[in-house]
Amino acid sequence: MNAASAVTVEHLVKRYGHLVAVNDVSLSIHEGEIFGIIGPNGAGKTTTVECISGLRAPDSGSISVYGLSPQKDRNKIRDFVGVQLQESALPPRLKVGEAVRLFASFYSNPLDPDQLLESLGIKQIVNSSFKNLSGGQKQRVSVALALVGNPRLAILDELTTGLDPEARREIWSLIERMKDRGVTVILVTHFMDEAERLCDRLALISHGTVIELDTPEAIAAKAGGSRVRFVPSQPVDEQTLRAIPGVTEIERKEKYVTVTGSGDLAGALMNALAAIGVRVSDVEARTGNLEDAFIKLTKDDASSFGKGVQI
Amino acid sequence: MTGSRLEWMSRRSRAQFAELLKVQSKLALREPYALFGGLALPAVLLAVFGFIGQANPGNVGSTGLTIIDVWTPTILVLSIIFISVSLPNTLVRDREIGWLRRVSTTPLHPSRLLAAQLVIDLILAAAAVLIVILEGALVFGASLHMQILPFAVSLLLSIVELFSFGLVLVALVPTQAVAQPVAGVATFGLMFLSGLWVNPAQVGDPLQTIMYYSPSGAAVRAVLDSAFNGGPSYAALLTMAVYTVIFGFIAIRYFRWE
């Protein structure tokens, strides 16, 4: 039995003139999960969430948000969907408290603005003008505006772009707290560490199509496993290495040997080399992560895609 | 049931609009383009002409009017022009930075934001009219023998016409950087056509006709005539009405929220 579906997108297509931004995207987002949308620049991530939030009308396909249509039930949906847009600023002289109170007045069942600002850790800037805020503060205000309507669904588009690592981590814990409160979150990002850490499930979009939809771990596993780099105490020939179970690729550079493969690669490698009396030093092992998978999968997709998205 | 729901909706949307008005007025005070152009500049201009008038008593040409009499209506229209051309300053910026789009993701339609801005500018225009009339009449002794109704109609039509012009700028100007010079040129053109530098009554055709049938020239003529000549000419009122329709059409046709 699946969890209740918060958002269902079926065969979504959106064109801008001759450019197909989204080409047959289908996905289902469960209630209460953090759903990530990742993909290369121009893959159609933002267009997809803009269609879900009702900012853009799809050319074809259907979208259901808690059973409602973003186009037909525009006003109802806006009352319980909070949106944080990529590259959206506030009037420079608008103060943080004014902006949040103003947005609260737009919704039928808003959160208390002061409590919200407190919980986001930005109570101290309530009287600051937007133009005087740091990047991290601006993003937190943007999150506050997306949340003040007490949404059931929050759509966050590239929330941490341009933030320093500390501010990013703060925003992450904020998103985790949103999930704890039962808010369904759609997170558009091009940071793989962010997707890996926060998202329950991910859709990898490339050239306007979903090419993977799974948990971050499952997608990462598709990167093809691990990589071990080491310096052998004496030269090891290629055949010996190839014979080790799981090894798929061998690369040599100066004194370093890099072996790529799957399974318990480092263990198998160490044992095999020890058996023939080769000692190793400077060992560096890395298991496949989402970033590897992302690069591999989008590259595969590009090479199989042919001549691009122009029609 | 339906009735109470409707009432609740309207009460909520009234509360929304009140909050919006409050915030937009605070912003208008912090970014006082309209405030400066609409209230301070005309007050100063009027004072300049007031002192010129005191230094040169007597009538202007054969009009039977003193300098301050002639200039008070012109400056009234000028203050409306200044407020109108300040519309793109805030609205084009708000669109450019994505604020209008941001608002459109909420239950509030961004047209309410536009409406709030217009209400504030309308209040400002009313204040400007009051200041200029009081300053002209009380401080410098302009003799406005106006008939209230035609005078009010002329002023109101001037405001609607020139605000529509401001909205055309908002609709057509793409960015804030472009808005500044465009608004500058538009202001200069409207000021010239209003007769600030050249009195249309004293120039020949075709300039006189052009000025009389320009958006600001027609406004000045209507206000001037209703202040001194018993009422505006239908030609001036009709001219403004036609401009209002044209500007309104262009503004609605080309307006973008993002």
Image: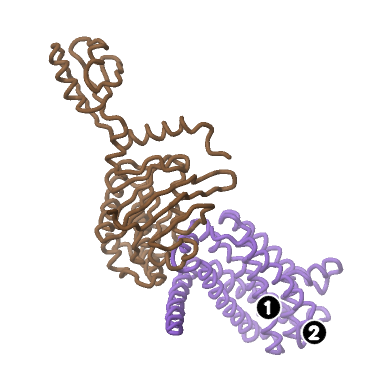
Chain colours: A brown, B purple
Q: Position of residue A112 (x, y in %)?
A: 30, 70
Neighbour tally class for label 1: few under 14, some 14-19, many 20 plus, Cα within 10 Å? many
At 51% from the left and 45% from the top, the residue drawn is A21
Q: Position of residue A289 (x, y in %)?
A: 28, 35
Q: Where is residue A174 in the image (x, y as percent from the top left)?
A: 28, 55
Gap in Å between the C-alphas at discs 2 and 1?
26 Å
Which residue, as the protein is rendered here, is positioned at the far front?
A1
Instruction: For mark 1, name the chain.
Output: B
Residue highlighted by disc 1 = B157
Quarter of the picture holding the N terminus of chain A: bottom left
**N-terminal label among 2 and 1:** 2
Amino acid carrying label 2: it is Gly
**Disc 2 secondary structure class:** loop
Amino acid carrying label 1: it is Leu
Quarter-of-image position of residue B188: bottom right
Instruction: Give the number of the mark in front: 2 or 1.
Output: 1
Instruction: For mark 2, name the chain.
Output: B
Q: Position of residue B195 (x, y in %)?
A: 74, 71
Q: Does the rendering let one see residue A257?
A: yes
- Residue B64: give its label: 2
Vertical placement of B89 versus B213: above or below? above
